[in-house]
Image (cartoon, rainbow, N blue to C red):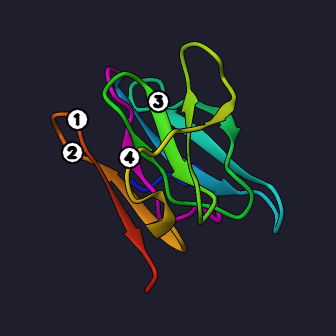
């Protein structure tokens, strides 16, 4: 049986680390995009945070941080502590982070892959 959880979702669907839940981007309106979490046991949906403006690509670190980009800089949102978007420090080649379109974290959680436009 199909159940509609939300309409107008983005392309970024992820398992939430350490939980029986998945996250998704809910495009509530043209300017309000939210990161939401679906508990797969209770089917309850909760809001985690707004996305960075106009951005729907996120990744999760193993320790519960959401990673995203505004297109030029990388940010993280600590779901357990600060609960706000914080700009990450990129040590090498930060000048190459122009037009970030996708982000992924490897299974071990020690590397981040960033796709940029040429």
Residues marked 3 and 2 touching at CB (< 8 Å) = no
Q: Using residue 49 as the reference point, say whether residue 81 is left or right of it.
A: left
How far, Cα to Cα, is label 3 from label 2?
14 Å
The first of marks 3 and 1 along the sequence is 3
Q: Which residues are magenta?
A: 6-18
Quarter of the figure with residue 18? top left
- Of labels 2 and 1, the one closer to you: 1
Residue position for label 1: 110
Local packing at callout 4 (Cα closer than 10 Å; few below 14, some 14-19, many 20+) is some
Q: Residue sitting at 46 percent across and 45 percent down?
A: 90
Residues marked 3 and 1 touching at CB (< 8 Å) = no
Tag 4 secondary structure: strand
The first of marks 4 and 3 along the sequence is 4
In the rendered image, residue 113 lying in the magenta stretch gets the answer no
The first of marks 3 and 2 along the sequence is 3
Residue position for label 3: 65
Q: Residue sitting at 61 percent across and 44 percent down?
A: 35
Residues marked 2 and 1 touching at CB (< 8 Å) = yes
Return the x and y of residue 108 as percentages of the image width and height. Answer: 16, 34
Q: Is residue 81 above or below residue 46?
A: above
Local packing at callout 2 (Cα closer than 10 Å; few below 14, some 14-19, many 20+) is few
Q: Is residue 25 above or below residue 101?
A: above
In the rendered image, residue 15 lying in the magenta stretch gets the answer yes
The first of marks 1 and 4 along the sequence is 4
Residue position for label 2: 106
Residue position for label 4: 14
**Most extreme residue toward the left, as rendered?**
108
Tag 2 secondary structure: loop
């Amino acid at each position: 049986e199909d159940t509609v959880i939300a309409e107008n979702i983005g392309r970024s669907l992820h398992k939430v680390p350490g939980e029986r839940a998945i996250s998704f981007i809910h495009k509530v309106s043209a300017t309000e995009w939210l990161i939401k979490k679906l508990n797969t046991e209770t089917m309850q949906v909760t809001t985690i945070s707004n996305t960075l403006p106009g951005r729907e690509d996120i990744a999760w670190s193993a320790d519960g941080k959401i990673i995203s980009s505004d297109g030029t800089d990388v940010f993280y949102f600590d779901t357990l502590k600060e609960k706000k978007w914080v700009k990450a420090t990129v040590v090498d080649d930060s000048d190459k982070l122009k037009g970030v379109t996708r982000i992924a974290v490897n299974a071990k959680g020690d590397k981040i892959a960033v796709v940029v436009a040429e």
